[in-house]
Image (cartoon, rainbow, N blue to C red):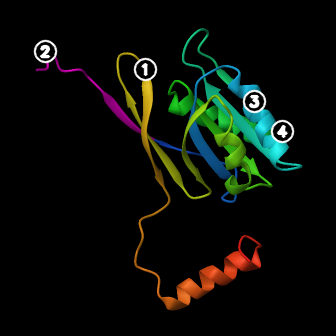
Amino acid sequence: MWSEVRRMKWEVVEITKPSEDINVIIGYTHFIKSAEDIYEALVNSVPGIKFGFAFCEASGERLVRYEGTDEELVRYAIENAKRIGAGHSFVILLRNAYPINVLPALKSTVEVTRILTATANPLQVIVVETEQGRGIVGVVDGLTPVGVEEEKHRKERKEFLRKIGYKL
């Protein structure tokens, strides 16, 4: 039996980025060492990658820690992370690379505990706030489907993946 009702505030945070072609990765990590390790994972995955990374520290000084190779993307990552404000969450914005190029390295970074989304779509983060702090409940990635692919769509999909080199 619950003895008290706890108060919560819900918020939808719109993720902003400098242009529509920028990809965003949002996840959770658990240690201050993450900033340098995620930086290394990204630069070692794609030569010439441009990115901004920001991480919301959940204890100690509780700062937004950041790294990156592109000042504009770093600024956007910091602003998005501040608006999300959930402890241990991180935001990465990518230019000249795609999530598929970096996700294996991110997932194998020992501090990364979860990847919530990786997308270039319009993105919203659903955040809940309690008396302790903020947490990410989920994400809204893109728009709602409007139908089911037909055979011509399947053919186009398969041709496209082969054209760009992701399938033989």
Q: Amino acid at mark 2?
A: Ser
On the image, numbered disc 4 is attached to which residue?
69
Q: Amino acid at mark 4?
A: Thr
Label 3 neighbourhood size at 10 Å, few (<14), some (14-19), many (20+)? Answer: some
Q: CA distance from mark 4 to mark 2?
A: 50 Å
Which circle, 3 or 1, is nearer the viewer? 3
Residue 150 circle label:
none
Of the image marks 4 and 3, the number of the one nearer the N terminus: 3
Task: Give the residue pinned by disc 1.
Answer: 133
Q: Is residue 2 magenta?
A: yes
Please name the amino acid that badge 3 sits on.
Asp
Mark 4 and mark 1 lie on one chain; the one further toward the N terminus is 4
Number of residues whose C-alpha sits closer than 10 Å to that of mark 1, classed few (under 14), some (14–19) or many (20 or more): few
Cα–Cα span, label 1 and label 2 = 21 Å
Under circle 4, the secondary element is loop
Left or right for 70, reference 7: right
Disc 4 and disc 1: Cα gap in Å?
Answer: 30 Å
Q: Which mark is residue 3?
A: 2
Most distant residue in the bottom direction: 152
